[in-house]
Every structure is written in C-alpha cells, then in structure tokens.
Amino acid sequence: MTLSPRRPRRRRPAPLIGSLALATGVGLAVAPAHAATPTAAAAATIVVAKDGSGTYTTVQAAVDAVPANNPSAVTISVKPGTYRETVKVPANKPHIRLVGTTSSKNDVTIVYNNASGTPKPGGGTYGTSGSATVAIEADDFQARNLQFVNDFNEGNTSIADKQAVALRTAADRIVLDNIGAVGDQDTLLLDSASKDKVGRVYVNNAWIQGNVDFIFGRASAVINKSAIRLVKRYDGSSGGYVAAPSTAAGKKGFLFINSNITGDVSSRSFYLGRPWHAGGDASLDPQAIVRNTDLSAAIKTTPWTDMSGFSWKDDRFAEYKNTGAGSGAASTDRPQLTDAQAADYEIADWLGGWQPSS
C-alpha cells in the first residue's frame, strides 16, 4: 500500500547538505541561533592528549574549561587514544566542536561501560539516559573523526536492565560527521531537551552498531550516507530492531537516507523499527522513514512491528526506493511513499531551515 499524504506536495530546491563534504581539519560552520550572553571568552582550541602533550588529558576536563554561555565556537581537538571516561556537555556550553585529529573515526575512542541497571555510587541506578558514555545537552554541538562506545557486557547476569547508551544528544542543531556509535542495546539516543522542543540532528558518514532499539529517541534526525551494522546478542542469537522513534505529534522523527543496513546476523531476523511511546504516552506519533537505502537479507519481509501495545500502523513508518535483498514491494505490511510524497521527505524538509555547511 502507499502512505496517505498528510499535506500537499511542495517543490523544494535540492538540499545542499545532502552532499556535504567535509575537509579534514576544517570545522562545520553553523549559523548561531539564540546564543546566550557570554560570561567569559574561551580559547579557540583546546587540545586533549592521553600522553600529556595537550592542554588536558581527559575530554571532560576540556569541556569543563569552556566558559558557560560561550558565544563562539570552541574546538576540543582530541589526539589519538582510548579515553575511558564519561563526558557531559551541559546545556550552558553551546558551540563546542569535538574533533579527532586524524581523518579516521577509529583513532579516537571515548568509552565507558555503564548500563541502565548499573548501581550508582550514591544509590539507585543510572537508568537508560544516564548510562550514556557521552551526553550532549548543549545546542550547536558538532563531533567529527572519533567514536563513542559503550562496552557494557550484556552477559553480566547481575544487571537486569541492559540498555547501555554510547551517545546521547538532547539539544538542537547537532552535527555528527564521520563518527562511530558502538554498543548493543540502545546505542544511540537522539533526543530533544523536552517533548515540546525540537532537537534537530544531522548524522553523516557514520558507523552505528547495535541490536535492540539501537537508534532511538524523539529527535528530528537525519541519518545520511551511514553504515548501520546489526550485531548478535551476547548469547549468539540474532534478532532485534534498528529504530525506536518516540516522536512527538506534529514533529519529524527519523529519516534514514542513502545508507546501508547489514551485519553478520541471521537472515530475516531484524525489524527496521517499532514505535516507542515513551512512558505509555499515547499522544506521541513515532516516525521513521527509510529511503534510498540498501537493506541486507537480515531485514524481515515485514519490517515494522508493534511495541508495548502500540501498533506501528497507527504511527508513521514507510520506505521509499530501497534496494538489496531486504527490500520489498509495497503492501499493507510494507508502506511505500509515492514519488509525490517523497518530495516532502528530503533532508532539507527534516532540518527545517537549519543548514550545516562545510
């Protein structure tokens, strides 16, 4: 079947961001919006190096050195190495660029192993969002040439809640270019500051790995030209879900475009996604569109499924011109956009007037 249009077709110019090419060592320029009043100036570049050759030896120390409400871009340049730490960029530190010093995303790794059920030192547990290795709560953040990892061992039988986030964003105008997000369950949480706020995220040329709901949240996110890798569970079994959007009504959810989804897993064992009505909120209207993407045979022939009593057919899930062994023709179980509808499901539509540029 085809997805019934929700609005008239609009003609748009080809989005410049769709072919974004980033020069090594050159940051993305994003027009600042609603910059807060500065309290102090910050150095234009802060260097982090494990061997002590930089300004700081940890990423969090560099973030801490950025003054609150900094009005202009600050680059945190991270030299190759593995940084075992948790990092948080608070909401009052916008315009940070977190950049690995080489062109390979594998040369800089920020890694930790908290899970939702991991006990906190002061009591209680971290919860899913609190488990993030790196948490971004500030607008106009950019990351490039590094990877975010949560290496929690799902085989740990002492912890029941195994959601373990590698990267969490909860802000607007976020750029993630040439990055990795590696984990198992709930790897990449793309969120907004609150249900009523927009959280636009542009992910380009990324490696995103996981098995259960590993790209999830309420952000309006574009995942472009990325490799989405399906991995088996700790017990060797195959099966899972790529996306679990929790989009608010009237907002845009996840747009997967020009990417590929594959992995060393069993054939027809993974769903493309399911609707996450966080907290049982029936007012949400989860959305995921997968278009112009190569799907391996790991994807089920009925690629969407229900979640926690909510039917995916009541929300917004569809495909358009996908290829590969996991693609399929339109049916009641596999909605496809028409050409007219697809004209309103482009990158520029998703980012709503915000256009990162090289």
Image: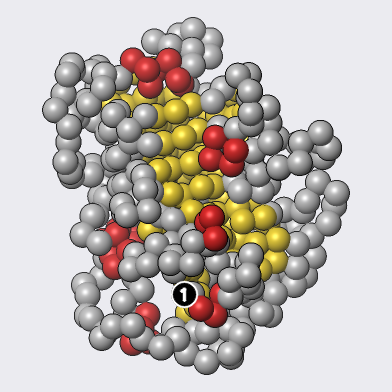
Question: x, y percentage for residue 198?
Answer: 31, 54
Is disc 1 placed on a helix, strand or loop?
Answer: strand
Q: Tell me if residue 291 comes above or below residue 281 in the rendering.
A: below
In the picture provided, is 298 more to the left or to the right than 91? right
Number of marks drawn: 1
Residue beneath the point at 46% across and 49% down: 190
Question: x, y percentage for residue 180?
Answer: 54, 43
Residue 308 figure quarter? bottom right
Q: Which residue lies furthest to the left in this view?
A: 37
Question: x, y percentage for residue 181?
Answer: 56, 43
In the picture provided, is 68 more to the left or to the right than 280? left
In the picture provided, is 291 more to the left or to the right than 22? right
Residue 140 seen by the camera? yes
Question: x, y percentage for residue 23?
Answer: 33, 42
Residue 66 figure quarter? top left
Residue beneath the point at 21% across and 59% down: 353
Q: Which amino acid does label 1 sit on?
A: Arg
Q: Tell me if residue 56 comes above or below residue 152 in the rendering.
A: above
Task: Name the residue beneath numbered marker 1.
Answer: 316
Residue beneath the point at 65% across and 44% down: 163
